Image (cartoon, helix red, strand yellow):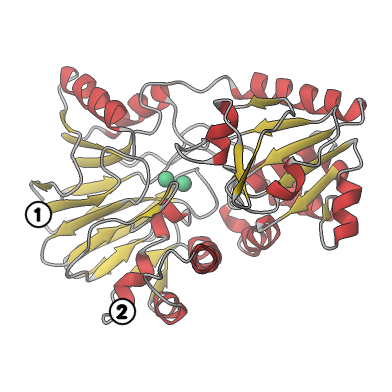
Amino acid sequence: MDIRFLGGAGEVGRSGFLLEGSKNILLDYGIKLDRKTEYPEQADRVDAVVISHAHLDHSGYTPTLYNSAFPAAFGTLPTRDLSELLINDSIKINRLQKTGQRFVKRELRELVNNYIPCNYRNPVEFGEYSVTLHDAGHISGSAITEIEGRKGRVLAYTGDFKPEPQTLHHGAELVKCDVLITESTYAMKDHPDRTQLRRKFIDHVKDVMDSNGVALVPVFAVGRAQEMLAMLQEEGLADRVFLDGMAKAATEIVMDYHGFIDNPQVLQKAMSNARWIQTPRDRSHALGGGTIILTTAGMLNGGPVLNYITKLNRNSHIFLTGYQAEGTNGRNLIEGRPLEIDEGTVRIKTPFSFYDFSAHAGRTDLFNYIRKAEPETVICVHGDKDNSEKMSEELKLEGFDAHAPKIGERMSIEF
Ligand SMILES: [Zn+2]
Ligand SMILES: [Zn+2]
């Protein structure tokens, strides 16, 4: 079998790995949302696509497969609905930015029509292959893909995964395999201890509210928003929360399939305690102080967060909680540059902090997971070039046949 790396190799974003065998199976097909959107290489003949999870760097380009063909799409139900939500939004953003449309709604509808919903640990036969999804512990519906060939060899693809538990997820399931395609986002960095981080974050948020400031927490609509909401509920703070942006629709989908998360009752309570922004009056109420605003976009690139960030009172604080990609306003803020808002630039004086609530495996967990999965071959993707290459070198020293491929590369594996 050959693997072609269409994107997401030596970079974070636009993941796309094409397995070429008796059937061609594409693992993810996403876009890269930097200053301008980047796309993976074209996939020629695709018999099926597996979508590991809804984030656009894994799902965002899948509709292009349905221009003139109808490949099967495998994934969980939350992934189907959350992808549809995020892809629809990306169509809108593209239209606003006039960046040119790569696909239209009809193709997105075809994706949904050809979707085969999978439950975790339930093998689905596809030609001579057997495809099984396992809980990846990253966001609702996220999956580690296991593909078994006729000769009994097993290939696993982690997608984005987290072995350590979060409020709404227990850790990723271990999948023993011969070939492992793994993310390497944090191959060189461990995350801080989650319990301590949470304590520090909550104390800080309370301090800001006690001085009548606004705790502005920019979040990704899918994943971080629900995780933060559940955490604030557990801390008895959900009734101080105002939610804005796409997080509402995303949280509703997550609750529709509550079997895919842990502690759904906590999220349910959080939803009824928090206030959803509906009118301009709600917005000014949220800005009144002593409040927490959870809103998209997580990297401050568009979305309602930009309505708030210039209007915060002087005791307010910005809490960044996730990865801020190169070229985004979030990165601008961290590096002391002005933000680009409505075709102008604005310097933000509100202080900010970064709390590393990552939903990805940190270095120690990543290496431990690989050791326990016991593959012969490890392929490091979804990481900056440096990270993936260093990780591959270290794995070689441990005796693995490790690789850090480049985009466009093709690799043969025994399968
Ligand atoms: Zn993700
Ligand atoms: Zn990703």
Q: Which mark is residue 67?
A: 2
Q: Is residue 200 visible?
A: yes
As displayed, is residue 179 above or below residue 127? above
Of the image marks 2 and 1, the number of the one nearer the N terminus: 1
Residue at horizontal 55 percent and vertical 66 percent from the top: 96
Residue 357 appears in view? no
Q: What amino acid is labelled 1 in the image?
A: Met
* Mark 2 and mark 1 residues within 8 Å of each other at the beta carbon: no
Q: Nearer the viewer, residue 347 or 314?
A: 347
Q: Which residue is depicted at the point 80% across and 33% down?
A: 235
Element type at mark 1: loop
Q: Position of residue 403 (x, y in %)?
A: 17, 34
- Using the numbered discs, state the Cα–Cα distance from disc 2 to disc 1 in whole angstroms: 26 Å
Residue 1 is tagged as 1
Residue 303 pos. (x, y %)? 65, 54
User: Observer-nearest residue: 295 or 22?
Assistant: 295
Q: Residue 151: x, y in percent? A: 10, 54
Q: Does the beta carbon of the residue at mark 2 sit less than 8 Å from ligand 2?
A: no
Which residue shows up at 21% across the image and 27% down it?
A: 392
Does residue 170 sit above or below 265 in this rendering? above
Q: Quadrant of the N terminus?
A: bottom left
Residue type at mark 2? Answer: Asn
Q: Which mark is residue 319?
A: none
Query: Local crowd at mark 1 within 10 Å, few (<14), some, or many (≥20)?
Result: some
Image coordinates of residue 44 in percent, x first then y, are 17, 68
